[in-house]
Amino acid sequence: VQLQASGGGLVQAGGSLRLSCAASGRALSSYAMGWFRQAPGKEREFVADISWSGTTHYADSVKGRFTISRDNAKSTVYLQMNSLKPEDTAVYYCAAGSLVVPGTNAGKVQAYDYWGQGTQVTVSS
């Protein structure tokens, strides 16, 4: 599976962005999908995940502001980000995993098999 993330950019605090992650090589419906982010000098952290059936989970820091969704027909996963804050600034990565279990390992980097290249999100104050 090859993943291509896009949609990042520079936005002012309070603004919105929508990230996309397009998959190729295998049916996206076979995988749970996740979004992670990594700020300079920090470890990669979980943002959100969505199971093959559409069940979602979010990190507490983005709950109520971000929405993850998927369109299996288009082999694409989205991350709608609203009310952005400067602390949301990071490189955002999408990932796919065949053994991800919601509520257990979905928030762990090691649970995912495939990763996109990342897209930069910068939120100015």
Image (cartoon, helix red, strand yellow):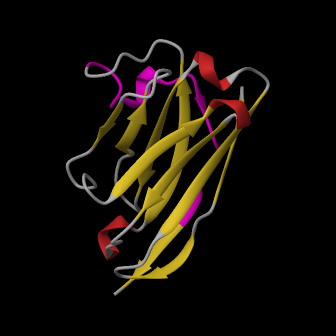
x, y percentage for residue 106? 36, 26
Q: Observer-nearest residue: 106 or 50?
A: 50
Residue at x 37% of width, y 41% of height: 48
Is 97 situated left or right of 90 in this image? right
Residue positioned most to the left: 60
On the image, the x and y values in percent for residue 38 come to 42, 53
Viewer can see residue 118: no
> Residue 62's spot in the image, x, y percent?
28, 55
Q: Residue at x 48, y 80 (%)?
A: 11
Q: How many marks?
A: 0
Q: In the figure, residue 3 lies in which quadrant?
A: top right
Q: Quadrant of residue 94?
A: top right
Q: Residue at x 33, y 31 (%)?
A: 107
Residue 63, compared with residue 88, is above or below; it is above
Q: Is residue 115 magenta?
A: yes
Instruction: Report if residue 76 is visible in the image.
Output: yes
Which quadrant would the N terminus be assigned to in this image? Answer: top right
Range covered by the magenta-colored residues: 104-120
Q: Is residue 40 above or below residue 42?
A: below
Using the image, determine if residue 88 lies above or below residue 71. Answer: below
Q: Is residue 29 left or right of residue 68?
A: right
- What quarter of the picture does the C terminus occupy? bottom left
Judged from this view, the residue extending furthest toward the right is 25
Residue 16 lies in quadrant: bottom left
Could you tell me residue 98's position as x and y percent? 53, 14
16 left or right of 28?
Answer: left
Residue 25 part of the magenta segment: no
Q: Is residue 43 left or right of residue 79?
A: left
